[in-house]
Amino acid sequence: MIPEAHLYVHQQRTNELPHSTRELKPTEDPSGLRVRLGWTLVHVGLRLATPARPAPAFSS
């Protein structure tokens, strides 16, 4: 068996695939909903992971 046979098959399959002529969308603005949701989940996870602080004692 030829060691490079899988490379040949891969190249042939790549040539058979249709090439897309549409333009790719530019990347989204980093202030998008996805980023804000991600940071919100990070904050929630950090609050769940940190131990609870005791409530301050008020003297009367």
Image: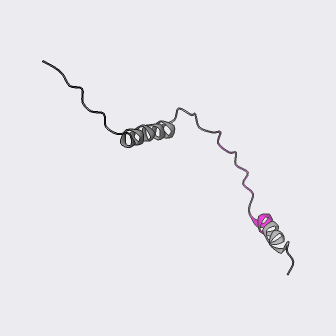
For the record, the magenta segment spans: 13-27
Q: Main secondary structure of the magenta part?
A: loop
Residue 59, image quadrant: top left
Q: Is residue 60 magenta?
A: no
Q: Is residue 26 magenta?
A: yes
User: Compared to 20, does 46 lie above or below?
Assistant: above
Q: Position of residue 28 (x, y in %)?
A: 59, 37
Query: Horizontally, is 52 left or right of 16 in the view?
Result: left
User: Could you say which is closer to the camera, residue 18 or residue 48?
Assistant: 48
Q: Position of residue 36 (x, y in %)?
A: 47, 36
User: Compared to 56, does 3 lie above or below?
Assistant: below
Q: Name the residue located 74 percent from the left edge and 64 percent from the top edge.
A: 17
User: Could you say which is closer to the camera, residue 5 or residue 43?
Assistant: 43
Residue 58, image quadrant: top left
User: Compared to 52, does 9 lie above or below?
Assistant: below
Q: Position of residue 22 (x, y in %)?
A: 70, 49
Query: Horizontally, is 37 left or right of 16 in the view?
Result: left
